[in-house]
Image (tube, rainbow, N blue to C red):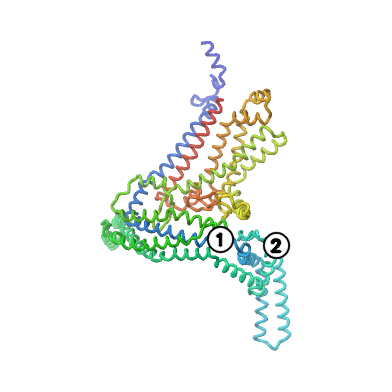
């Protein structure tokens, strides 16, 4: 009993005397305040989850209704046929792109001279507006004098001198402005192969601005470009590609006409279905308005309008009858499409005949699609034959359509689709690129600073790395759009890097661009946590290793790093969570294309980006609203799971 009292007296939170409110003293208040952090965190997380689930709760039932209407109206039937045409059109588009890229690569700088000329001219015209106005005024005064007072030679001579002075002033200012513009400042960033035309372009732009006519240089360039393109088009494999393109395009018009005809039928069906869906609410609103009407005339009019509202469900069997009857016509146009596609594919040359990597990439894509397109034709035809507008859409289809769907289409006049796979793929790809870049630098930096660097280097490197975390994400995003994107495009065009998959980079806004910036943002987080893990390794491990004769490097690689591996892994996971939750960089720098990326140099979209982009444009409580909150819920679960796994690893590490 005595020892128990002694223990109580030694407890800093146990004090019998002192000021108390409701039985809680100062020591108890401090204890409960800091001890309640975990409880508060649980409450906040629970509220967030409840908030997300509350707004996303009705998404799947509403999405099922939308898909049911999509089937009943016949839109599903039309999309089967439309997917056949879209797949075939992709082949012809790739053929067109392959030719254009081959011409671009063979012509080199010559291909872009006229574009650069126009860009220079546009830049200069913005800066010399006052001089141009003065020149036009001088020209106008001279013309007026010659028309009205042709006998006044002195005045005409003065006007001519003023015109000459205005031209010289314009020439001098234009020359000065254009001399300050570098080709890399232009909007067109693809002209990076040769600068030999640069001075000639500058002189030509000045003359073109003053005279308003094409210069001899520009005429010669256009003639050379036209001649070079004609020579390339005369190459046998380019002619084969042109023939293939014609064969691809030949059946498209008839197939498009067929699709458009049945599309109009489905659109009318959907219009009637939507009218019926809202009929009950409209009738109820009119009856309510009639009850509240202040005069008999208004009441009578509202009642008549309510009686005219049709609440009878449309006869979908009758509405969809033309679609069922269109199967024979579809088979006819599909046969032509299939035959011409086979003929065209036989004409497509092999990729090794092309010099440009971008052209070869398109041709290889054509040959890849060749292996699947006819299976797609057969599959969609079978879907059309088996299509039944009365077949119920199960809830499972709405769920799988969201979690495994490859289309995210919103605000469409046809049909909205909410498939998260393209957004998830974009988020995962950019996070993987970022983590692959960030881990070597951040973990390697932590090891060097913690174990190898001198005190001076530690005082310099650590603040610099930590300062990176203070840079606003919008600043990094702006840097990616203006500087890094252009740098990647300009410096991946050379042949010695063309062997790397995905290069050359064709767009400024890509997964690679965003990944580099996210890697920079995650370095401080991973660096700090990894260094903490290294600091937690007992000094006795290092001393024992050195005592056994191991070198400093051997000790770091075989003792220190394995001992801190759990903490380093947790640091990487927390850094990954920081990356996947970033919004501004991925929204502005990834390109915003909602499609499953094929390489890290493709533009893409992300879950955080779609939330930031669309949440402010949707109606609260709508299907689109619920879809965005469902995306937010998925993102929250991913981030929470990563943090949970990291905490488990950290706890495991702390026990060793």
Is residue 319 or residue 176 the one in the foreground? Answer: 319
Query: SS of the residue at dot 2?
Result: loop
Packing grade of label 1 (10 A; few <14, some 14-19, many >=20) is many
Nearer-the-camera pick, 583 or 571: 571
Mark 1 element type: helix
Disc 2 residue crowd, few under 14, some 14–19, many 20+, Cα 10 Å: few
Q: Earlier in the sequence, mark 2 or mark 1?
A: 1
Q: Quadrant of residue 431?
A: top right
Q: Residue at the spot x=56%, y=41% of the render?
A: 435
- Residue 131 seen in this snapshot: yes
Residue 620 in the image: state x and y as whole percent. Answer: 42, 50
The image position of residue 136, as x and y in percent, is 65, 75
Place of residue 205 in the rendered image (x, y in percent of width and height, measured from the top left): 66, 69
Q: Which residue is mark 1?
A: 101
Estimate the spatial distance between the alpha carbons at disc 2 and disc 1, rounded to whole Å: 31 Å
Query: Mark 2 near mark 1, Cβ–Cβ under 8 Å?
Result: no
Q: Residue 365: horizontal and vertical position, in percent?
A: 49, 55
Q: Say the numbered circle drawn on residue 554.
A: none
Q: Looking at the image, which is closer to me, 95 or 64?
A: 95
Check the image and name the residue furthest to the bottom.
Answer: 151
Name the residue that disc number 2 marks.
180
Splitting the image into 4 quarters, where does residue 342 fall?
bottom left
Question: Does residue 597 appear left or right of residue 135 in this picture?
Answer: left
Q: Nearer the viewer, mark 2 or mark 1?
A: 1
Q: Is residue 233 above or below residue 396?
A: below
- Classify the position of the C terminus by image quarter: top right
Query: What is the quadrant of residue 162 in the picture?
Result: bottom right
């Amino acid at each position: 009993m005595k020892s128990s009292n002694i223990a109580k007296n030694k407890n800093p939170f146990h004090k019998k005397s002192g000021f108390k409110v409701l039985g809680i003293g100062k020591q108890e208040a401090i204890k409960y305040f800091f001890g309640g952090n975990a409880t508060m965190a649980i409450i906040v997380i629970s509220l967030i989850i409840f908030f997300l689930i509350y707004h996303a709760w009705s998404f799947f039932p509403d999405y099922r209704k939308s898909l049911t209407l999509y089937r009943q109206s016949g839109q599903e039937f039309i999309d089967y046929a439309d997917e056949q045409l879209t797949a075939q059109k992709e082949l012809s588009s790739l053929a067109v792109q392959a030719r254009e890229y081959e011409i671009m690569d063979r012509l080199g700088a010559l291909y872009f001279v006229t574009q650069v000329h126009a860009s220079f001219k546009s830049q200069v015209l913005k800066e010399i507006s006052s001089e141009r106005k003065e020149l036009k005024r001088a020209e106008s005064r001279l013309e007026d004098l010659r028309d009205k007072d042709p006998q006044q030679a002195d005045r005409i001579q003065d006007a001519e001198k003023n015109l000459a002075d205005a031209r010289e002033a314009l020439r001098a200012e234009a020359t000065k402005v254009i001399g300050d513009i570098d080709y890399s400042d232009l909007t067109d960033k693809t002209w990076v192969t040769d600068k030999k035309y640069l001075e000639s372009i500058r002189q030509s732009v000045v003359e073109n601005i003053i005279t308003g006519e094409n210069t001899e240089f520009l005429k010669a360039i256009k003639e050379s470009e036209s001649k070079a393109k004609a020579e390339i088009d005369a190459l046998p494999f380019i002619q084969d590609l042109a023939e293939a393109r014609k064969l691809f395009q030949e059946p498209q018009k008839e197939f498009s006409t067929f699709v458009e005809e049945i599309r109009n039928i489905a659109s009318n069906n959907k219009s009637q279905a939507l009218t019926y869906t809202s009929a009950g609410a409209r009738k109820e609103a009119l009856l309510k308005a009639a009850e509240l009407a202040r005069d008999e005339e208004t009441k009578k009019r509202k009642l008549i309008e309510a009686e005219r509202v049709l609440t009878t469900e449309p006869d979908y069997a009758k509405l969809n009858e033309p679609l069922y009857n269109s199967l024979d016509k579809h088979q006819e146009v599909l046969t032509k499409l299939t035959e011409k596609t086979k003929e065209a594919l036989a004409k497509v040359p092999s990729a090794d005949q092309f010099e440009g990597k971008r052209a070869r990439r398109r041709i290889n894509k054509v040959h890849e699609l060749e292996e699947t397109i006819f299976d797609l034709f057969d599959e969609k035809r079978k879907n059309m034959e088996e299509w039944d507008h009365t077949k119920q859409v199960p809830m499972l289809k709405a769920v799988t359509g969201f979690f495994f769907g490859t289309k995210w289409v919103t605000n469409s006049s046809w049909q909205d689709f909410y498939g998260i796979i393209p957004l998830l793929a974009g988020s995962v790809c950019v996070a993987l690129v970022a983590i692959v870049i960030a881990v070597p630098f951040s973990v390697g930096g932590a090891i060097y600073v913690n174990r190898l660097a001198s005190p001076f280097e530690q005082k310099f490197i650590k603040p610099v790395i930590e300062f990176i975390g203070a840079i606003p994400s919008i600043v990094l995003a702006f840097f990616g759009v203006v500087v890094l994107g252009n740098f990647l495009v300009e410096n991946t065009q050379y042949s010695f890097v063309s062997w790397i998959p995905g290069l050359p980079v064709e767009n400024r806004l890509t997964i690679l661009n965003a990944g580099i910036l996210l890697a920079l943002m995650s370095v401080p987080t991973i660096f700090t946590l990894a260094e903490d893990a290294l600091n937690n390794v007992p000094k006795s491990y290092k001393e024992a290793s050195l005592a056994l004769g191991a070198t400093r490097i051997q000790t770091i690689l075989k003792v220190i790093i394995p001992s801190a591996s759990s903490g380093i892994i947790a640091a990487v996971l927390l850094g990954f969570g920081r990356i996947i939750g970033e919004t501004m960089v991925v929204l502005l720098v990834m390109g915003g294309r909602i499609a499953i990326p094929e390489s890290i140099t493709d533009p893409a979209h992300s879950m955080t980006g779609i939330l930031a982009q669309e949440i402010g444009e949707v109606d609260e409580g709508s299907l689109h609203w619920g879809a965005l909150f469902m995306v937010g819920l998925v993102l929250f679960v991913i981030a929470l799971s990563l943090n949970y796994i990291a905490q488990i690893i950290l706890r495991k590490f702390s026990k060793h």
